[in-house]
Image: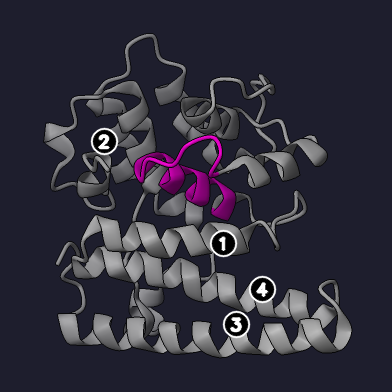
Amino acid sequence: MRDDFNNQEIYEKLIEKDNTELEHYKELIQKAIQLNGPDSRGVKNGYIILNTSYQRVVNTMYSAGYAIKEIKEIFKELLVNYVNIWSSESGYIELVKVISLAVLLGFNSEDIKTLEDRLVEEKFDDCIINFLIKSIDASWGFNGNNYEYSVYECLGDAINSVQVSDDLLKDYLEKKWYKIHKECSWYDIHKKSPELYAGYWSFEAGAVAKILGVDDSSLKDEQYYPYDLVHFEG
């Protein structure tokens, strides 16, 4: 396991629960499409439910110690579904997470093209998003240095540093990361509903380290840092 807050049995039960929900709602979505068309409210609600399960199962699999290649296969499905629900009106933190995972899992520009098109369509020009996407797609056209939302401004010290060090990421992980996510639905879930705890991971810190080639040996055992993902090749 990569996170021993819960035992393997609890993680496996959560994964099983989410996989069951994924299959159930995939079937319901197909029926809703046949009855009411792909743009109906029921279909959109189904995609939102799928996203919740996909997001959690990726976290839980990583926490439980699953092979990264297995997680990558699930993430491919997550990415296809995510494009159906993303909008500039909501989900900024989730967007950063999704693109960070695309970086860490070695996805290419073709893999994220549909999501890129959605971002262009909504003129979503954000400093962190641009930084992450350009590491995948050098032709990405947005260059803005502003933040659509302020939550990740504190990570700007790392990506804008002439020579980023592990100290900057260590400070972000230890002093800032958990606090800036206090509005998230999963915040403090380890206290409220430990059986639903999927793991707390700063995928964006890992992506920054990977993109900039940070010597992260001192971060290997740092809470929230996805060390195995940063060093995944495949």
What amino acid does circle 3 point to? Lys
Q: Residues within 10 Å of mark 2 (few under 14, many from 20)?
A: some
- Name the residue that disc number 4 marks: 47
What amino acid does circle 2 point to? Lys
Give the CA distance from mark 4 to mark 1.
22 Å
Q: Secondary structure at mark 3?
A: helix
**Percent position of residue 110, x then y:** 56, 39
- Name the residue that disc number 2 marks: 170
Residue 216's image quarter?
top left
Would residue 212 be visible to someone looking at this image? yes
Quarter of the figure with the N terminus:
bottom left
Give the CA distance from mark 4 to mark 3.
8 Å
* The magenta stretch spans residue 103: yes
- Name the residue that disc number 3 marks: 26
Q: Secondary structure at mark 2?
A: helix
Relative height, residue 183 to residue 196 (above, below)? above
**Residue positioned 66% across, 73% down in the render:** 47
Give the CA distance from mark 1 to mark 3.
29 Å
**Percent position of residue 67, x then y:** 21, 61
Eye-nearest disc, 2 or 3: 3
Residue 171's image quarter?
top left
Relative height, residue 135 to residue 18 (above, below)? above
Question: Disc 4 or 3, which lies upstream in sequence?
Answer: 3
What amino acid does circle 1 point to? Glu
Give the CA distance from mark 2 to mark 1.
22 Å
- Name the residue that disc number 1 marks: 183
Do labels 2 and 3 touch, CB within 8 Å?
A: no
Question: Disc 1 or 3, which lies upstream in sequence?
Answer: 3
Is 136 or 194 nearer to us in this picture? 136
What's drawn in magenta, residue-wise? 94-111
**Residue positioned 51% across, 44% down in the render:** 99
Do labels 4 and 1 touch, CB within 8 Å?
A: no
